[in-house]
Every structure is written in structure tokens, then in C-alpha cells.
Image (spheres, helix red, strand yellow):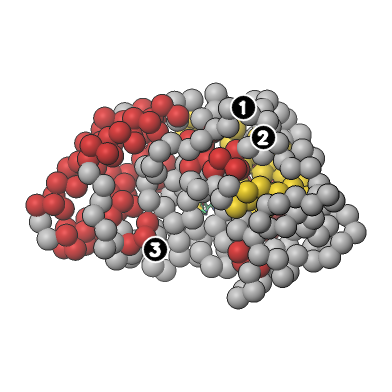
Amino acid sequence: MVVRPLEVPLDGAATSHALPFAEPEQAPPNLPPKGQLLKWIGSKQRFAAAIVATFPKNIATYYEPFIGSAAVLATLAPQRAVASDALAPLIDLWSAVAERPEQVVAWYSERWQTMMDGEKVNVYKELRDRYNRAPNAADLLFLTRSCYGGVIRFSKIGAMNTPCGIHRPIAPAEFARRAAAWHERLANTRFVHSDFEAMIDGAAAGDLIYCDPPYSDSESTLYGAQKFTLVRLLDAIDRAKGRGVRVVLSIDGSKRSGQRVCDVPIPHGLFATEHAVTVGRSMLRRFQLPGQTLEHEVVADRLLLTWTA
Ligand SMILES: C[S@@+](CC[C@H](N)C(=O)[O-])C[C@H]1O[C@@H](n2cnc3c(N)ncnc32)[C@H](O)[C@@H]1O
């Protein structure tokens, strides 16, 4: 991948040669809801404000085909959106948050009370076994809040196998406060259980798609992501771009930190702009200018945009 080298130091101090800082188009800046509703490995909650700041103002329909914990969607709180994921109980859960938040609070409160009344790890294992016998939104919700590190991990045969977390799950009153806040922000979103490709193929000119995919090489047992391949995603993005859809792709920059180099096969010309997003910092640079590889740079997260901001 040939890109222009960074001209802004990673500490954010701009040099006189620096490219212009990417100005947020939305004012006031969108902030995420206070506190995640789900604990979710790979959640973009901490980066969501910086990610949303790169989005254009005029979005016909916002698409997010790898919705996970919905951090970016809830930060944008769009007027019209379609959110989807390959994990069916997760979509049932988000639909319930959007349509019947009181039921979601009841699901959480019942399970929290059962855990407080019993022996924590045993209650957790019973809940996990029940989920594995019949995957459902209510049990998935409590598993995400009580499992170790919010890691939703599946065995090769598709059983959720994360151990119990060492923390105490948040109290029902705090969960209810969060559920109300998230409900408001998801009011205009339609949730769909689907593989990403069909959703991306459904977007039209004027729409924006934000993609935060799993990493096919390291996350094959996370989230039930077995059918994901980056090549398939990049092809779908290419088709969408051809129809006039703007696409933003998150790629984990830390994979180039030195311990492990990730050779993401990004086709030449697919993306026009790159932002390096870290907590509280955002830097802009352009692709396809004569330059060097980025192999030895350390950044927290990368955002690739199909258009020039
Ligand atoms: C990195 S997580 C997204 C995290 C999200 N941005 C957040 O803030 O929580 C990737 C998501 O992709 C979903 N996924 C995996 N394979 C998929 C596929 N083939 N189609 C659609 N979604 C898929 C997983 O279930 C998971 O929720």
C-alpha cells in the first residue's frame, strides 16, 4: 500500500507542513451516550465521537452493517438508518431497545436479581447454557454485561464459551438509565438480521455506510463471524462506491504496531482519504501520493473514506 507519510506527529502537534486538520462537519459534536448499554469487545464507544466527526452532514440513509454494540450509531443518532449484524439475537436485542425499552430493562433486572440471589459463577453458567440451547436476546444481553471483558466468543460448534467476568454487573437502576438514553438515539433505526453484503448492496447514492468489520484472521470465533472475509467486504464497498454511496471503513491500526503486521489488501484507488483516530486526536492525510509504507507507525485506529473530505 503506497500512501503519503504522516506529516503530523502522533502527539497531535501540527507542523508547518501539516495537512489541514479534519474539521468536524457536525456542530455541536455528537457525543456517545454516557455509559455503554452492552459490554462488547471491539466496541467503538471511545472512538465514536472522532469517527462521527468525519461523516458528512447530508446523509440520506445511514447504514451500519456490523452493528455490534451500536456505539457509532448511537453517537450519530441519525434521522434515518438501517443497522444490521450476522448475530440474530443481537438484532432482536437492538430492536427491543428501539421498540420496547421497558421490556429490555425487565430482562436485565430479572437476571441481575437471580445472580445476586445465587452463586454468581453458577448462575452465569446456567444462563450461558440456556443461551446456547436456545440463543435469545434477553440472555445475550445479560451475558454481555456479566461475561469476562465483554468478549462474546464462540466455540467452533457455535457455543458461547466466555467465562464469567470478575466484575459485578451494573445495577438495574443504572441499566434503566442507559436503556432510556439509548432508546432515544435509536428511534429512527430499522434493525435487520443480515450478512453485511446484502445490506451494503441495498444502499443508494446519497447514503453513508460505516463498516467496522471483524478481523478475519483473528476473530473467527468472535461474534460468530465465520462467514466474514475482507475481500468480500472490499468488493461490496467498491460496488457501493460505483453507485455514489459514501463508505467509511474502520481498520485497527494497532495491527501495525510491530508485534504483528497486518497486510490489509486494500485495492489501489478504492479509498481517497485516511484519518488516524485515537482518543481525542484525529489526523488527516491523503492516499495515493508518492510516499512510503506505514509499516512502522503506531496508531490506534484507522478510518478509510471513499471520498475526499
Ligand atoms: C468489530 S464488531 C463491531 C463493533 C461495533 N462497531 C461496536 O462499536 O460495538 C464486528 C461485528 O460484525 C458482526 N459480523 C461478523 N460477521 C458478520 C457478517 N458476515 N455480516 C454481518 N455482520 C457480521 C459481528 O457479529 C460483530 O457484531
Packing grade of label 3 (10 A; few <14, some 14-19, many >=20) is many
Mark closest to the chain's N terminus, 3 or 2: 2
Which marked residue is nearer to the observer: mark 3 or mark 1?
A: 1
Q: Which residue is mark 2?
A: 24
Left or right of residue 92: residue 249 = right
The amino acid on which the numbered mark 2 sits, given as a three-letter code, is Pro
Left or right of residue 98: residue 259 = right
CB atoms at circles 2 and 1 under 8 Å apart?
yes
Considering every residue shown, the one lying at the far left of the view is 117
Image: 225 above or below 188:
below
The amino acid on which the numbered mark 1 sits, given as a three-letter code, is Ala
Give residue 305's quadrant in the image: top right
Left or right of residue 256: residue 129 = left
Q: Which residue is mark 1?
A: 27
Q: Secondary structure at mark 1?
A: loop
Image: 160 above or below 75:
below
From the Cβ of disc 1, is ligand 1 less than 8 Å away? no
Mark closest to the chain's N terminus, 3 or 1: 1
Whole-Å distance between the Cαs marked 2 and 1? 7 Å
The amino acid on which the numbered mark 3 sits, given as a three-letter code, is Phe
Q: Residue at x 72, y 40 (%)?
A: 22
Q: Nearer the viewer, residue 110 or 275?
A: 275
Image position, residue 218 (x, y; %): 53, 68
Quarter placement of the N terminus:
bottom right
Image position, residue 26 (x, y; %): 63, 29
Q: Which residue is mark 3?
A: 154
Q: Does any portion of residue 220 appear in the rendered image?
A: yes
Q: Does any portion of residue 134 appear in the rendered image?
A: no
